[in-house]
Image (cartoon, rainbow, N blue to C red):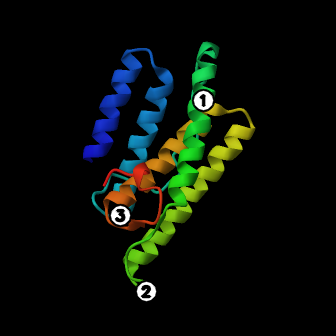
Amino acid sequence: MGMAHAYSVDGAAFYTAGDLVNALASYWYGFGWLHFGCAFGLFSTPGGMNSCPFVERCERLPAMLAPKLIEKTTRYARLLDTARASVAPAPEPETSAHDFASRLLVIVAGYATQGNCFQKENSLEDALASFSYGHGWLDAGMRSGLFRITRNRDLFTV
Protein backbone atom coordinates (compact mmCIF):
# COMPACT_ATOMS: atom_id res chain seq x y z
CA MET A 1 0.00 0.00 0.00
CA GLY A 2 2.87 2.34 0.80
CA MET A 3 4.40 2.12 -2.67
CA ALA A 4 1.00 2.41 -4.37
CA HIS A 5 0.29 5.53 -2.33
CA ALA A 6 3.74 7.00 -2.99
CA TYR A 7 3.33 6.62 -6.75
CA SER A 8 -0.18 8.06 -6.57
CA VAL A 9 1.25 11.12 -4.84
CA ASP A 10 4.06 11.31 -7.42
CA GLY A 11 1.53 10.97 -10.23
CA ALA A 12 -0.52 13.83 -8.81
CA ALA A 13 2.59 16.01 -8.52
CA PHE A 14 3.58 15.25 -12.12
CA TYR A 15 0.02 15.92 -13.29
CA THR A 16 -0.17 19.23 -11.41
CA ALA A 17 3.17 20.27 -12.93
CA GLY A 18 1.86 19.48 -16.42
CA ASP A 19 4.13 16.44 -16.88
CA LEU A 20 1.42 14.13 -18.21
CA VAL A 21 3.83 11.47 -19.49
CA ASN A 22 5.41 10.88 -16.07
CA ALA A 23 2.00 11.15 -14.41
CA LEU A 24 0.69 8.36 -16.64
CA ALA A 25 3.70 6.14 -15.92
CA SER A 26 3.58 6.84 -12.19
CA TYR A 27 -0.13 6.14 -11.75
CA TRP A 28 0.03 2.84 -13.65
CA TYR A 29 3.19 1.72 -11.84
CA GLY A 30 1.47 2.33 -8.51
CA PHE A 31 -1.61 0.49 -9.71
CA GLY A 32 0.61 -2.51 -10.51
CA TRP A 33 1.78 -2.51 -6.89
CA LEU A 34 -1.83 -2.25 -5.69
CA HIS A 35 -3.09 -5.07 -7.88
CA PHE A 36 -0.15 -7.26 -6.82
CA GLY A 37 -1.06 -6.68 -3.16
CA CYS A 38 -4.58 -7.94 -3.80
CA ALA A 39 -3.36 -10.96 -5.78
CA PHE A 40 -0.76 -11.80 -3.12
CA GLY A 41 -3.44 -11.66 -0.44
CA LEU A 42 -2.02 -8.71 1.49
CA PHE A 43 -5.39 -6.95 1.40
CA SER A 44 -8.70 -7.10 -0.43
CA THR A 45 -11.04 -4.66 -2.05
CA PRO A 46 -14.82 -4.67 -2.23
CA GLY A 47 -15.72 -6.76 -5.26
CA GLY A 48 -12.09 -7.84 -5.72
CA MET A 49 -9.61 -6.87 -8.41
CA ASN A 50 -9.77 -9.92 -10.62
CA SER A 51 -10.21 -8.24 -13.97
CA CYS A 52 -7.69 -6.75 -16.31
CA PRO A 53 -7.40 -2.99 -15.75
CA PHE A 54 -7.02 -2.32 -19.48
CA VAL A 55 -10.69 -2.59 -20.36
CA GLU A 56 -10.65 0.91 -21.79
CA ARG A 57 -7.84 2.67 -23.60
CA CYS A 58 -5.90 5.50 -22.01
CA GLU A 59 -6.77 9.05 -22.91
CA ARG A 60 -4.56 10.40 -25.72
CA LEU A 61 -1.97 12.92 -24.61
CA PRO A 62 -1.41 16.19 -26.51
CA ALA A 63 0.68 15.79 -29.68
CA MET A 64 3.35 18.15 -28.35
CA LEU A 65 4.24 15.45 -25.77
CA ALA A 66 4.97 12.85 -28.46
CA PRO A 67 8.79 13.05 -28.28
CA LYS A 68 8.82 12.48 -24.50
CA LEU A 69 6.15 9.78 -24.77
CA ILE A 70 8.11 7.95 -27.48
CA GLU A 71 11.36 8.12 -25.52
CA LYS A 72 9.84 7.01 -22.21
CA THR A 73 7.79 4.20 -23.77
CA THR A 74 10.81 2.84 -25.63
CA ARG A 75 12.98 3.07 -22.51
CA TYR A 76 10.36 1.42 -20.27
CA ALA A 77 9.88 -1.45 -22.74
CA ARG A 78 13.62 -2.11 -22.70
CA LEU A 79 13.82 -1.72 -18.91
CA LEU A 80 10.97 -4.16 -18.28
CA ASP A 81 12.47 -6.76 -20.63
CA THR A 82 15.87 -6.45 -18.95
CA ALA A 83 14.38 -6.62 -15.46
CA ARG A 84 12.29 -9.68 -16.33
CA ALA A 85 15.39 -11.46 -17.64
CA SER A 86 17.28 -10.55 -14.46
CA VAL A 87 15.20 -12.42 -11.90
CA ALA A 88 14.27 -15.97 -11.00
CA PRO A 89 11.80 -17.34 -8.46
CA ALA A 90 13.40 -17.36 -4.99
CA PRO A 91 11.16 -19.80 -3.10
CA GLU A 92 11.90 -23.51 -3.14
CA PRO A 93 10.43 -25.44 -6.09
CA GLU A 94 7.27 -27.40 -5.31
CA THR A 95 6.03 -24.69 -2.91
CA SER A 96 2.99 -22.48 -3.38
CA ALA A 97 5.24 -19.41 -3.13
CA HIS A 98 7.33 -20.70 -6.07
CA ASP A 99 4.13 -21.32 -8.03
CA PHE A 100 2.97 -17.77 -7.32
CA ALA A 101 6.35 -16.33 -8.35
CA SER A 102 6.21 -18.30 -11.59
CA ARG A 103 2.66 -17.09 -12.27
CA LEU A 104 3.80 -13.55 -11.53
CA LEU A 105 6.48 -13.83 -14.23
CA VAL A 106 3.77 -14.93 -16.68
CA ILE A 107 1.60 -11.97 -15.67
CA VAL A 108 4.49 -9.53 -16.16
CA ALA A 109 5.36 -11.12 -19.51
CA GLY A 110 1.74 -10.67 -20.57
CA TYR A 111 1.83 -6.96 -19.83
CA ALA A 112 5.17 -6.62 -21.64
CA THR A 113 3.66 -8.36 -24.68
CA GLN A 114 0.54 -6.21 -24.46
CA GLY A 115 2.72 -3.10 -24.28
CA ASN A 116 4.64 -4.23 -27.37
CA CYS A 117 1.36 -4.73 -29.25
CA PHE A 118 0.15 -1.27 -28.23
CA GLN A 119 3.51 0.17 -29.29
CA LYS A 120 3.20 -1.43 -32.75
CA GLU A 121 -0.30 0.09 -33.04
CA ASN A 122 1.22 3.48 -32.15
CA SER A 123 -0.97 3.57 -29.04
CA LEU A 124 1.93 4.79 -26.93
CA GLU A 125 -0.12 5.89 -23.92
CA ASP A 126 -1.48 2.34 -23.57
CA ALA A 127 1.98 0.88 -24.19
CA LEU A 128 3.55 3.02 -21.47
CA ALA A 129 0.71 2.14 -19.09
CA SER A 130 1.23 -1.59 -19.76
CA PHE A 131 4.99 -1.44 -19.27
CA SER A 132 4.65 0.63 -16.09
CA TYR A 133 1.91 -1.59 -14.68
CA GLY A 134 3.89 -4.76 -15.40
CA HIS A 135 6.98 -3.28 -13.80
CA GLY A 136 4.94 -2.42 -10.71
CA TRP A 137 3.99 -6.10 -10.42
CA LEU A 138 7.61 -7.19 -10.87
CA ASP A 139 8.99 -4.73 -8.33
CA ALA A 140 6.32 -5.67 -5.81
CA GLY A 141 7.20 -9.34 -6.26
CA MET A 142 10.86 -8.50 -5.77
CA ARG A 143 10.16 -6.50 -2.61
CA SER A 144 8.00 -9.38 -1.31
CA GLY A 145 10.87 -11.84 -1.58
CA LEU A 146 9.46 -13.86 -4.45
CA PHE A 147 12.49 -13.33 -6.70
CA ARG A 148 16.23 -13.44 -6.53
CA ILE A 149 18.31 -11.19 -8.73
CA THR A 150 20.41 -13.14 -11.22
CA ARG A 151 21.97 -10.15 -13.04
CA ASN A 152 21.60 -6.38 -13.53
CA ARG A 153 21.36 -5.76 -9.80
CA ASP A 154 21.41 -2.01 -10.44
CA LEU A 155 17.84 -2.21 -11.81
CA PHE A 156 16.40 -3.05 -8.41
CA THR A 157 16.10 -1.28 -5.10
CA VAL A 158 16.49 -3.99 -2.47
- At horizontal 34% and vertical 36% (from top left) the residue drawn is 7
Q: Is residue 86 above or below residue 91?
A: above
Q: Residue 120, position in %: x, y?
A: 74, 39
Which one is nearer the viewer's eye here, 55 or 70? 70
- At horizontal 68% and vertical 40% (from top left) the residue drawn is 118
Q: Is residue 33 above or below residue 125?
A: below
Q: CA distance from mark 2 to mark 1?
A: 41 Å
Residue 49 visible in the current orientation: no
Return the mark for residue 40.
3
Q: Which residue is mark 2?
A: 94
Q: Is residue 79 left or right of residue 18?
A: right
**Which comes before the other along the chain, label 1 or label 3?**
3
Callout 2 touching callout 3 (CB < 8 Å): no
Which one is nearer the viewer's eye here, 104 or 46? 104
Q: Residues within 10 Å of mark 2 (few under 14, many from 20)?
A: few
Q: Residue 133, position in %: x, y?
A: 48, 45
Q: Which residue is mark 1?
A: 71
**Which comes before the other along the chain, label 2 or label 1?**
1
Q: Residue 75, position in %: x, y?
A: 57, 38
- Callout 2 amino acid: Glu
**Which comes before the other along the chain, label 2 or label 3?**
3
Of helix, strand and loop, which one carries label 2?
A: loop
